[in-house]
Amino acid sequence: MLFICYPKCTTCQKARKWLEEHKVKYTERNIATDNPTYEELKTWHEKSGLPLKRFFNTSGMIYREMQLKDKLPSMNQEEQLKLLATDGMLVKRPLLIAKDRVLVGFKEAEWTEKVQ
């Protein structure tokens, strides 16, 4: 599994601890230094079955500075994916990528149900 996180993020730290406690093998990737590409994001979005807006870090500074709350509704999916690919800090984290699923954000109950 691929665990995409921002090491300074407390939610990501909780998710890493959960992975280690449950002995889940993963490869870690820092979203700030290794930004997801457009193609990766497109694939993950399709695999997740979630609305694309769930992939945005709505509590992040960049999201607020760019006033994306107001701009996203008028953007099409391709424009949103291209925007997400410009800066990893726009992407909600952590992401847990497996062959058959993608989990966005850390909700312990969801991860317990879907990871094990």
Image (spheres, rainbow, N blue to C red):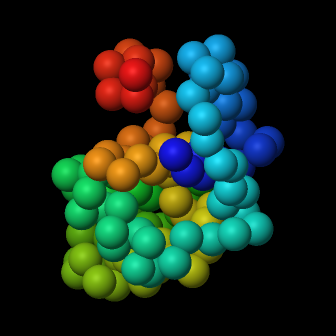
Q: Does residue 61 appear left or right of residue 113 in this picture?
A: right
Q: Residue at x 69, y 69 (%)?
A: 34
Residue 78 at least partly seen: yes
- Residue 40, image x and y in percent? 44, 72
Q: Is residue 11 above or below residue 45?
A: above
Q: Does residue 15 appear left or right of residue 13 in this picture?
A: left
- Residue 9, image x and y in percent? 71, 40
In front of the other: 34 or 2: 2
Number of marks: 0
Q: Residue at x 76, y 68 (%)?
A: 33
Q: Residue at x 25, y 77 (%)?
A: 77
Residue 57 at least partly seen: no
Q: Residue at x 29, y 48 (%)?
A: 100
- Residue 25, image x and y in percent? 60, 35
Q: Does residue 7 appear left or right of residue 71 in this picture?
A: right
Q: Quadrant of residue 53?
A: bottom left
Q: Quadrant of residue 61?
A: bottom right
Q: Is residue 40 above or below residue 23?
A: below
- Residue 97, image x and y in percent? 45, 50
In front of the other: 106 or 26: 26
